[in-house]
Image (cartoon, rainbow, N blue to C red):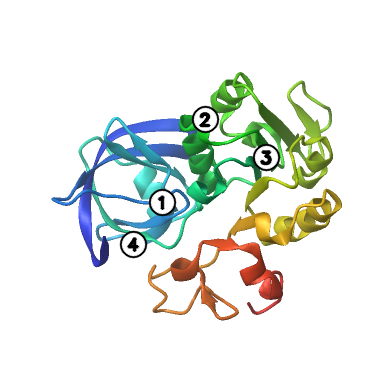
Amino acid sequence: MTDYVPIRARLMVTTEESPGLATLHLKVQSETPFTFQFGQFNMLSMFGIGEIPISIMGWQDGLLMHTIRAVGRVSTAMIGMQKDQELGLRGPFGKGWPLEKFEGRDLVFITAGLGCAPVVAAINYAVAHRNRYRRIVILQGVKHHNDLLWQPKYDAWRTMGDCQVLLAASEESKRKHHWKLGLVTALLDDAEFDPRHCAVMICGPEIMMLAAMPFLQKHQVRDEDIYLSMERNFQCGMGACGHCQIGPHFVCRDGPVFHYPDVKPWLGVKGF
């Protein structure tokens, strides 16, 4: 782990997911093995341009993967990198999903918007270790169906045994075959899982998380079975700068994955 000084990572492959969104496959230049939890993030830097936090997607063929959307100066530069070009990497930072703790339970993944990488990484892990978990339920909501970024994955997940994939688009004029109109929270009424033996993992805007809680309560899901991946302004990754504070917690250090009861008093409170 590198807290202050970045190690170098070389770009080997760029996979375009959609216009302005790409997955970078990086060869980490480190003498020690790079290990992480799904849900953690790295601070990636373009030398001479800047540094941004990016969720870890996982490993593939010995390469570290990060999915990045071009929304600013640094991320746009990263999307435009050429093969063998190098960037800086600090991390991993924060706490991930306690997936080992969830073994033997139904897994319910709820995500809204385009920042769903932390949940997708956990889904990939659960799929790779399918025999450790019971039913898998995947709920994703976006504004437009074209924003559903992982179409090949949705189709593959649907073919697995005991896996339900429900998709929603909130701003559309008509219904399509594999998704419905509305918000992701409405999908919970169609979700099939055991609320007594489940783990719910949520990633997305905080307003969506707040909206999901009454639906989960209606389905008798306990607070202690809910985990959230919080989003804040990460600038250091170590809880030193204070930009990501929520109540007594620093999201970059104590999260970004939180047990819902630990942040419940501060969720949605202005100023936190």
Q: Residues within 10 Å of mark 1 (few under 14, many from 20)?
A: some
> Which comes before the other along the chain, label 3 or label 1?
1
Determine the CA span between mark 4 and mark 2.
42 Å
Numbered tag placed on residue 37 in the rendering: 1
* Front position among marks 1 and 4: 1
* Front position among marks 2 and 3: 2
Q: Secondary structure at mark 2?
A: helix
In the rendered image, the vertical position of residue 109 relative to residue 149, given as above or below: below
* Front position among marks 2 and 1: 2
* Front position among marks 4 and 3: 3
Residue 229 in percent (x, y) is at 57, 57
Numbered tag placed on residue 261 in the rendering: none
**Residue underneath mark 4:** 50
Determine the CA span between mark 2 and mark 3.
23 Å
Determine the CA span between mark 1 and mark 4.
25 Å
In the rendered image, the vertical position of residue 222 relative to residue 138, given as above or below: below
Numbered tag placed on residue 131 in the rendering: 2
The residue positioned 61% from the left and 56% from the top of the image is 227
Residue 163 in percent (x, y) is at 65, 28
Determine the CA span between mark 3 and mark 1.
22 Å
Q: Secondary structure at mark 4?
A: strand
In this picture, residue 53 sits left or right of residue 251: left
Q: Secondary structure at mark 3?
A: strand
The residue positioned 52% from the left and 30% from the top of the image is 130
**Residue underneath mark 3:** 140
Q: Secondary structure at mark 1?
A: loop
The residue positioned 51% from the left and 47% from the top of the image is 99
Q: Residues within 10 Å of mark 3 (few under 14, many from 20)?
A: many
Name the amino acid, label 2. Asn
